[in-house]
Image (tube, rainbow, N blue to C red):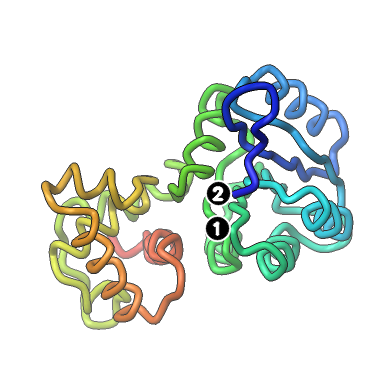
Amino acid sequence: MASDTRNGPKRIRLMLVDDHTVFRIGLSSLFRTVSTVNVVAEAGTVQQAVALARHTAPDVVLMDVRLPDGDGMDACRAILRARPETRILMLSGYTDDDAVVASIQSGAAGYLLKGIEPEQLIEAVERVASGASLLDPQVTETALEFMRRGGRPDAQHPFAALSDQQRRIAVLIADGKTNRQIAAELSLSPHTIKTYVSSMLHKLRLSRRSQIAALMVRRRGDS
């Protein structure tokens, strides 16, 4: 990633996208107090976000789901086509399962609610920049509980093809853990976890590990 190395250690290059100016100013003020983050751009529309992402090369984009000329998913897809290495974290005021799934399927690394505490939002940006995927607990709690109970899904469930170990790994992916963190928790090597994840993606016909968490959200009513 094109992290900012000026004035000391590497800093996360962050772009803020929200059409509410006051809210965006608040986010900017918050992150300008964080030594690990450099706010490189701010945008209020899909068009501005895509153009500024190409120009400023952010490591992480904090993206509003609803924008006046489209939605955050449109911007997410366009940005990732130009800069696949950028990590996009969706921020919404709504616990809308369809929006969560659409966000992750568009390539977003996570989905958080605007009621999140400031320190948790800062941590989320840092974790996403390091490679983690995150979903707000309020939109995943029911689905994750189903998986943690070890319940075996029926034949129509997307996770029916996964082994018990793969479902345990799916829970940890949705918890936002990296492959290295999952390896430590399950006493396996990172290479083994990577192999498991590759197999899971193949079985589920997905292209990104974060989409595994999105499937949990979609099926949370099954519990």
**Residue at position x 76%, y 21% in the image:** 29
Location of residue 115 (image quadrant): top right
**Badge 2, how many Cα within 10 Å: few under 14, some, many 20+?**
many
Q: Position of residue 25 (x, y in %)?
A: 82, 28
Judge left or right: residue 99 versus residue 126.
Answer: right
- Give SS at disc 2: strand
Q: Amino acid at mark 1?
A: Val
Q: Amino acid at mark 2?
A: Tyr
Q: CA distance from mark 2 to mark 1?
A: 6 Å
Residue 119 image label = none
- In the displayed structure, would residue 160 be above or below residue 39? below
Judge left or right: residue 24 versus residue 171.
Answer: right
Q: Are marks 2 and 1 in contact (CB under 8 Å)?
A: yes
**Residue at position x 66%, y 64% in the image:** 80
**Badge 1, how many Cα within 10 Å: few under 14, some, many 20+?**
many
The residue labelled by disc 2 is 111
The residue labelled by disc 1 is 100
The answer to which of marks 2 and 1 sits earlier in the sequence is 1
